[in-house]
Amino acid sequence: METVEPKDRKNFLPFALPSIGEAEIAEVVDALRSGWVTTGPKVKRFEADFAEYLDAQHTIAVSSCTAGLHIALAALGIGPTDEVIVPTLTFCSTANVVVHLGARPILVDVQEDFNVVTKAIEAAITPRTKALIPIHYGGQACDLQEIYEMAAHYNLAVVEDAAHAVGATYQGHKIGSNTLQDVTRKPPTVTAFSFYATKNMTTGEGGLISTADDDLAEHMRLLALHGMSRDAWKRYTDAGSWYYEVVLAGYKNNMTDIQAALGIHQLRRLPGFIQTRQAYARLYDQAFAALAEIETPVTHPDRSHSYHLYVIRLNLERLTLDRAQFIEALKTRGIGSSVHFIPVHLQPFYRRHFGYRRGDLPQAEGLYERIISLPLYPRMTEADVQDVITAVTDIIARHRK
Ligand SMILES: Cc1ncc(COP(=O)(O)O)c(C=O)c1O
């Protein structure tokens, strides 16, 4: 076995990089010069543009997807003694927000496409279950039809964690759109998107929640900014008044105009970003199809994948190195990669507070040992994609059993 791994690239290829253009930069400068650096007209414009893009009734820009999930659950009245079902193969914040409200996250298993097992949700339902948070892992929708049917049957609220899934579709309808009700028979309760730096579009940090429910939208808008009945923009313009009322003990989860300045232009470029991601994913699929040592992502014909992530699964029984060594071998060749995610139930806090143990959610644990997220973003060139393919192929050739 070869022990010295070759160094292929001169420059390290980071796992992820945003594509920020001149239009975004000029809009941020405009926000800075205008004096509106907090929530103001650019946030309003971004929300309106996003509502049109999604075909959504209400859109509320917030400081992060985590903040959006938090206020969605709070507006739905989730609190102590409630249980909320969350797939374990997610970022910790999906479960943390449940804990923040004093409720209990019930972590459930996932399947080979990395999305939640619908039957596992059903098995976890108890009289205390109030809501579930399906995530659209990597940018591919989970089985929304089954999930909404079950939620309707058991009278559960659904908050979709669409951190990865801006621009993804399910049976031809965008995640978070009103028209999804054609297949789910009722509009999505709340959908939360992330604009974190690595996501398909970015505002640096930021998020947005969409809903078709008027009352819920009003409630979430209040919760996003201290529970104040008028936001600063309404108070400080010539049409405004100094008077406001605090009608709820809300949070400080608003988006700023500096973030929205980025978002307005990132949203315009989003369809192109997704096309490039899909084209690069096809290059990976084709290059890896013949390799028995790895499996490419499982995709469903009724969904369009927005490819926030491209995650390969190693067939470890065919390899002489494990996942951590594979990542190191990629690094030596100048290729960054990552792991999405360490299952939440294996994290110390969740073991300590909720008694989870290794072995509780075996499919997620099995996947966790085998997964690597490869670089996939529009700022990569086709030559970069080829470098990743060459590195993966070469590592396999050297470490085949
Ligand atoms: C599945 C999932 N949910 C939620 C989040 C939180 O997003 P944000 O960083 O915008 O709060 C992330 C972020 O990486 C995520 O991957």
Image (tube, rainbow, N blue to C red):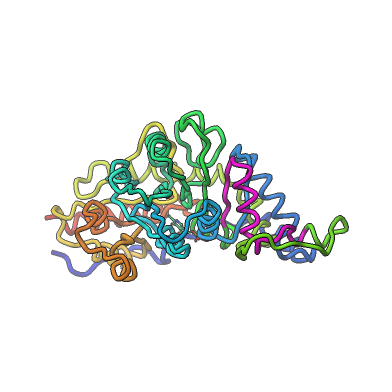
The span picked out in magenta is: 207-233
Whether residue 351 appears in this view of the structure is yes
Q: Is residue 230 magenta?
A: yes
Question: How many badges with numbers are in the image?
Answer: 0
Residue at 33% x, 63% y is 8
* 213 sits to left or right of 379: right
Query: Where 45 falls versus 368 (above or below)?
Result: above
Residue at 64% x, 54% y is 221
Q: Which quadrant would the N terminus be assigned to in this image?
A: bottom left
Residue lying furthest top: 182
Nearer to the camera, 79 or 199:
79
The spot of residue 113 in percent (x, y) is: 31, 44
The spot of residue 330 in percent (x, y) is: 31, 62
* 98 sits to left or right of 71: left
Whether residue 14 appears in this view of the structure is no
Q: Is residue 187 magenta?
A: no
Occupied quadrant, residue 83? bottom left
Nearer to the camera, 81 or 173:
81
* 358 sits to left or right of 305: left
Query: Where 45 falls versus 37 (above or below)?
Result: above
Q: Which quadrant would the C terminus be assigned to in this image?
A: bottom left
Residue at 50% x, 28% y is 182
The spot of residue 377 in percent (x, y) is: 47, 53
The spot of residue 299 in percent (x, y) is: 35, 39
Occupied quadrant, residue 99? bottom left
Query: Where 251 falls versus 288 (above or below)?
Result: below
Query: Where 307 falls versus 93 (above or below)?
Result: above
Residue at 33% x, 42% y is 285
